[in-house]
Amino acid sequence: MSLTITTWNINSVRLRMPIVEQFLTRYSPDILCLQETKCQNSEFPMEPLKALGYDHILIHGQKGYHGVALVSRLPLAEDYSTDYCGVGDSRHISAIFEKGGKRIRLHNFYVPAGGDEPDRAINPKFGHKLDFLEEMKLLKENAEPGVSSILVGDLNIAPLENDVWSHKQLLKIVSHTPVETDGMKEVIARGAWLDLMRQYRPEPEKIYTWWSYRAKDWDAADRGRRLDHIWSSADLGPALEEITVLREARGWDRPSDHVPVTARFAL
């Protein structure tokens, strides 16, 4: 029995519903985890998704900014969201689902981008990002006995040298600075998470999930970063069959700057 989960920073779900529908029609993951939905709960486009068979939808949104959602063919239960850093942002949602005899807790995150200057003394957005990471270090993959865990989302950090187009040139660029990458590695270590993308495609292979809108020809320049992640508890590692980064989606009509990343498990 297979399980497929996709994570995608959609950068406004209402604006990009045509490509969301295109993706779901073509690839049909069991669960689609969206970030940066940029709408209040009442404005979320439920009906087009339900028409495609995604009857179980959990949303945690806010007006114009942030926002996360779980769009699922499978029933979702025990849902909650955590207000990281206590500022009222919609950056986390979680639920439990069952597949192949397993109960699995799914976390969907949108970590703050952190602004442009990697110095919390002059850039409060960067300080917010670092504080968010500190709170994520308390999240354990085995927090609930008998429940496996999957964590996905736009985590806005490319932690490894081959997660960016140029390690040396990006060391002082927000998303790849040592304080961020070390912080993410500590989140992984403390939580005993598996970085499934790197389990499937180890370094030194390059992996990118994001290409800037600023590039005149993003495909030719290929200056990408791996900002989107899929982690799991240790017991799900052997069940991983494939990780797919749908690079072509960056070239779709009115695209997000992130592309869908899908994990397939054999349960």
Image (cartoon, rainbow, N blue to C red):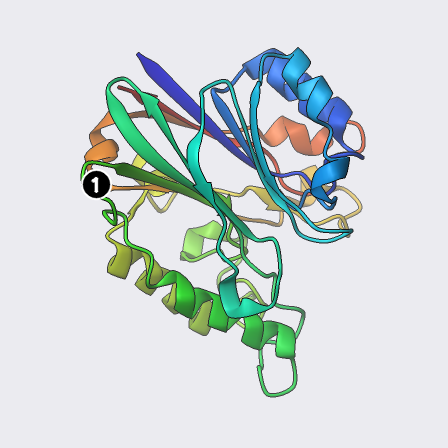
Which residue appears at 67% of the width and 12% of the height? 51
Residue wearing tag 1: 234
In the displayed structure image, the side of residue 194 where residue 211 appears, left or right: right
Report the front residue among 41 and 212: 41
In the picture, which quadrant includes the N terminus?
top left
Q: Is residue 159 left or right of residue 219?
A: left
**Where is 113 relative to 21, above or below?**
below
Query: What residue is rendered at 44% in x and 65% in y?
Result: 133
Q: How many marks?
A: 1
Foreground residue among 82 and 208: 82
Could one spot residue 247 in this view of the protein? Answer: yes
Dot 1: within a 10 Å radius of its alpha carbon, few (fewer than 14), some, or many (20 or more) residues?
A: some
Along the viewing direction, whichever of 215 and 20 lies nearer the viewer: 20
Image position, residue 154 (x, y; %): 54, 48
Answer above or below: position of 64 versus 125. Answer: above
Residue 221 appears left or right of 14: left
Q: Position of residue 120 (x, y in %)?
A: 57, 82
Which SS class for mark 1? helix
Say which quarter of the image contains residue 127: bottom right
Name the residue at 62% across, 62% down: 88
Q: Please state the horizontal and vertical placement of residue 60, each as a whole percent of the image.
A: 61, 45
Residue at 60 percent across and 68 percent down: it is 87
**Quarter of the image that includes the C terminus:** top left
Expressed as whole percent of the image width and height from the top left, the position of residue 147 reads 25, 37
**Can the viewer see residue 206?**
no
**View extreme (bottom): residue:** 121
Instruction: Tell me the amino acid under the disc marked 1.
Output: Ala
- Position of 67 with respect to 161 (left or right) is right
